[in-house]
Image (spheres, rainbow, N blue to C red):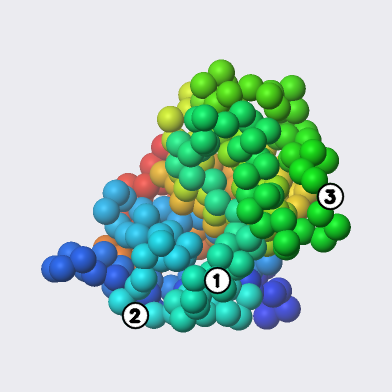
Amino acid sequence: MNSGENIKQVLEIKNLKKSFGDNHVLQGFNLKLFKGETLVIMGKSGSGKSVMVKCLVGLIQPDSGSITIEGEDITTMGQKELDMLRTEIGFLFQGSALYDSMTVRENLEFPLRRHKDKIENFQGTEVLVKEALENVGLLHAIDLMPAELSGGMQRRVAMARALILKPKIIMYDEPTTGLDPITAKEIIQLMRDIQKKYNTSSLIITHDVDCARFVSNRIILLVDGVNYVEGTFEELSNSKDEQVQAFFKT
């Protein structure tokens, strides 16, 4: 995908900084995400990826910098505005984060009921829940509990929940972590299918080189809280830089 001037920008992070005491985690991070694009963020543990994500979803406040979604700076928003904006972002948490005491159906109904005022012609959840589960191949599991599902199935349910409000942006936090290689490939293919069907803009945090290879339009390598390098998978995998090579050697 070409992120040229004619492509709509949906998310921009400018000069984001966040410190915890003497630990300067983010030191001027920048990012642009365009409509229909899949952008992958890679970096070592402690490089600032998780802090960036928490700033992006409003869980922590950055020390400085801006985060604009559809032209709105979320760092200046009140709680009510932030809650409404979150309906535009689907989030797949690392480890799926399903509610253990709820069935699959109830897990998917939860965001629908919470934001039913945002859904046009809201007449219940059944159709939307079944549609979301069909999209991830798990309609047959609608009345099961999370404990009855394999790790891969739990990840699929979490993807269905992230999609159910039809968000403009989907954020994936280590979507293949903890999965066996075959299941990880299935999740990667599902991510590609979802991107094609919904034309969402996707931001993916991952250590998985295969995931980055197969889903990314662009990749940003985050080192010590700043953008170290940016490019396509081919460009970065062919880099002679030692820090870049450390990620892309297979």
Q: Is residue 171 above or below residue 32?
A: above
Q: Which residue is mark 3?
A: 123
User: Residue at (52%, 36%) from the top-left corner?
Assistant: 98
Q: Amino acid at mark 2?
A: Ser
The outermost residue toward the left is 22
Q: Horizontal and vertical percent for residue 18?
A: 29, 70
Which residue is at the far top?
148
**Quarter holding residue 85:** bottom right
Whole-angstrom CA distance, mark 1 to mark 3, is 24 Å
Please give the label number shown on residue 181: none
SS for tag 1?
helix
In the image, residue 177 lies at what x, y percent? 44, 35
Q: Which mark is residue 80?
A: 1
The residue that appears at 68% across and 33% down in the rendered structure is 105
Q: Look at mark 2 in the image and give the residue it sits on.
A: 64
Image quarter (top left, top right, bottom left or bottom right) of the N terminus: bottom right
